[in-house]
Image: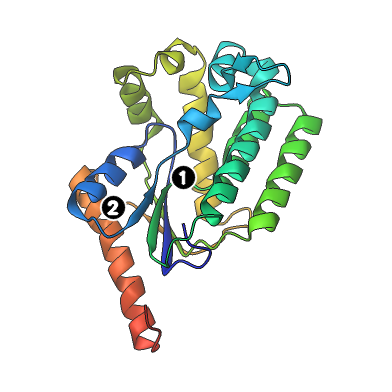
């Protein structure tokens, strides 16, 4: 990852919205982009002071009311480690496509707070930690492609894929609906904290959505060229 990429595009959306599938399709058709997958392994890994290995994501699904706030803080720490690692790499400016950006922790935290899985104090702590993360790295995001998928379809996909911990979580369908509402509010700038322009997905197919992403990139590069910006 470059500190100043030519462009950074985020594929953003609900759990099981289809972001990773679109990213994989782009990877198979275009090989000149730097793709950053969602850090699920990092989300589900934590080493205690005495060396014990914990699985925070599974702990959250098993006990959401007691773990939700801590997990969101852990997500911030995970992104912190990832950003630090990437910024230390000597990668020339390129086009980056992210499967979720750290800004989306705000969406999850709001949804969990409204679900009463995080108390007010925990909610404010998560917001404060996320603000520090975003301030520390001043992460440039040029465009968000919102993979807008109905929560019912997300739930159907979740049941089909092999992450058993998701299926076992009984409240997941309700959470997906809350997350969908929060994503819609965030992406229409109802909270006045959008980092960049947003394009809502129009196509329902993987190929169509991948094409829409590539069109966004081409339009961005064309705009740079019109303004006389090289690279």
Which residue is rendered at x = 60% and y = 49% of the image? 84
Question: How many residues crowd mark 1 within 10 Å: few (<14), some (14–19), many (20+)?
Answer: many
SS for callout 1? loop
Colour convention: rainbow
Q: Nearer the viewer, residue 63 or 58?
A: 58
Quarter of the rendering occupied by the C terminus: bottom left
Left-right relation of 140 to 26 = right
Mark 2 or mark 1: whose residue is earlier in sequence = 1
**In whole angstroms, how far apart are the C-alphas of marks 2 and 1?**
19 Å
Q: Is residue 74 above or below residue 3?
A: above
Question: Which mark is in front, 2 or 1?
Answer: 1
Identify the residue position indicated by label 2 in the image: 202
Tally of numbered tags: 2
Rendering coords of residue 92 (x, y %): 42, 66
Q: Is residue 4 above or below residue 75?
A: below
| Residue 114 in sight here | no
Residue located farthest toward the right when viewing the structure as drawn: 121
Identify the residue position indicated by label 1 in the image: 100
Rendering coords of residue 152 (x, y %): 37, 27
Q: Do the residues under discs 2 and 1 have CB atoms within 8 angstroms?
A: no
Which residue is rendered at x = 58% and y = 36% of the image? 108
Rendering coords of residue 70 (x, y %): 69, 26
Q: Is residue 43 above or below residue 96?
A: above
Quadrant housing residue 64: top right
Question: How many residues crowd mark 2 within 10 Å: few (<14), some (14–19), many (20+)?
Answer: few
Q: Nearer the viewer, residue 170 or 37?
A: 37
SS for callout 2? loop
Rendering coords of residue 150 (x, y %): 37, 35
| Residue 169 in sight here | yes
Q: Nearer the viewer, residue 116 or 48?
A: 48
Q: Is residue 96 above or below residue 41?
A: below
Left-right relation of 105 to 166 = right
């Amino acid at each position: 990852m470059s500190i100043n990429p030519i462009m950074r595009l985020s594929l953003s959306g609900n759990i099981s919205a289809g972001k990773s599938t679109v990213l994989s399709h782009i990877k198979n058709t275009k090989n000149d982009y730097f793709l950053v997958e969602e850090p699920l392994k990092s989300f589900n890994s934590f080493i205690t002071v005495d060396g014990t290995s914990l699985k925070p994501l599974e702990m959250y699904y098993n006990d959401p009311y007691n773990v939700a706030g801590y997990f969101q803080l852990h997500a911030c720490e995970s992104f912190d480690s990832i950003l630090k690692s990437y910024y230390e790499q000597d990668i020339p400016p390129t086009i980056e496509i992210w499967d979720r950006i750290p800004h989306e922790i705000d969406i999850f935290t709001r949804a969990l707070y409204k679900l009463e899985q995080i108390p007010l104090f925990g909610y404010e702590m998560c917001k404060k930690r996320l603000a520090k993360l975003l301030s520390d790295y001043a992460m440039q995001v040029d465009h968000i492609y919102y993979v807008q998928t109905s929560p019912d379809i997300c739930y159907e996909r979740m049941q089909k894929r092999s992450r058993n911990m998701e299926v076992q979580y009984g409240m997941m369908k309700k959470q997906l609906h809350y997350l969908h509402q929060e994503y819609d509010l965030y992406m229409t700038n109802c909270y006045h904290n959008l980092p960049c322009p947003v394009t809502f997905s129009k196509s329902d197919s993987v190929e169509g959505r991948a094409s829409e992403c590539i069109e966004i990139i081409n339009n961005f590069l064309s705009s740079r060229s019109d303004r006389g910006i090289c690279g």
